[in-house]
Image: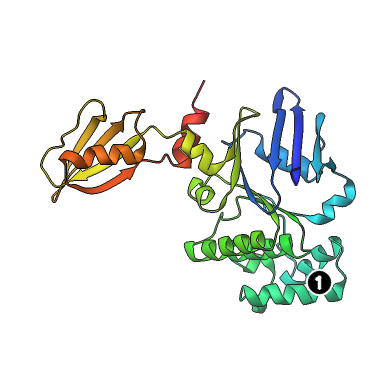
Amino acid sequence: MYFLETKEITKQFTAHLALDKVDIRVPEAKIFGLLGPNGAGKTTLLRIINRITAPDSGEVLLNGRPLASQDIFDIGYLPEERGLYKKMKVGDQCVYLARLKGLSAIEAKKRLTGWFEKFDILSWWNKKLEELSKGMQQKVQFVVTVIHDPQLLIFDEPFSGFDPVNAELLKNEIMELKRQGKTIIFSTHNMASVEEICDEIALINHSRVVLDGNINEIKSHYKTNTFKVQVANDDLELDAETGSVISKENHAYAPCFRIQKAQSLTNSGFLSALLKNNEIISFQEEIPSMHDIFIQTVQQP
């Protein structure tokens, strides 16, 4: 059983079909990447999971049962469009939002103080939000998202507006939440972040799921049996039963060949065949990146 599932979720806005029978399966205590180009339907799906809007048909299941109104207190949602009050003091509005999520004023202040100290932002407590930079506002929004200790966390472009140092800080906090057993849905256009932190993904394009599964299994599926091989000799001795040379790059210290391996050979067999007649300096299989897979998938007719 999955922690969260959507089954045949469909949503129509006037003449636009936003979601067309969308199924996703989110494992417990994992980071699940929800991917897709702009306008694919990701935000609509996240809003349905958060009960901000309702599907025209289909259902959302949490721990195998239909998602209910009270479940919203066990969800933390960081939307792409941030929603804090710019004229209100940071501390006051954080306490207010924490109380909306079921915390008492005393417990809210206690938890917020801990998070503010962790992020080194306690001095911002009495400042108005508009006095803070975009990155600082993002930190406050993140704290508000996690303050009620929900089991399901949904982050939509959480690193937007962050410099590399603060992006790394936030990434580490997300990984720590996973270690604590939280289930996380992570929506982003940054494929490098997806490769770094996600366990599984679903890619939505034109309102439908076009690719889903474990990241490592997906990357393995898209491999092309292509290797980069550097040799000490000027040329490469390669028989047709081993593979074929795609290209050659002349480096200062050793040429590098891109080789298509014969499908009948294992990687070990391929390397053994190369070693018979060549002095190998480096040997590396080309693994497709999630960026390349994303582009290839969404560009298919």
Which of the 4 image quadrants contains residue 250? top left
Which residue occupies the foreground of this view, 158 or 183? 183
Res 85 visible: no
Residue 270 relative to residue 1: left or right: left
Res 12 visible: yes
Which of the 4 image quadrants contains residue 86? bottom right
Which residue occupies the foreground of this view, 268 or 18? 268
Which of the 4 image quadrants contains residue 38? top right
Q: Secondary structure at mark 1?
A: helix
Q: Give how far across and how far down residue 127 sits, in percent.
A: 68, 74
Q: Give how far across and how far down residue 10 sits, in percent.
A: 76, 28
Q: Residue at x 86, y 73 (%)?
A: 105
Looking at the figure, which quarter contains the N terminus?
A: top right
Q: Residue at x 30, y 31 (%)?
A: 260
Q: Please, which residue is most extreme toward the left here?
A: 234
Which residue occupies the foreground of this view, 43 or 68? 68
Q: Is residue 83 above or below residue 206?
A: below
Residue 283 relative to residue 159: left or right: left
Residue that numbered label 1 is attached to: 108
Q: Give how far across and how far down residue 3 sits, in percent.
A: 75, 47
The disc labelled 1 sits on which kind of residue? Answer: Ala
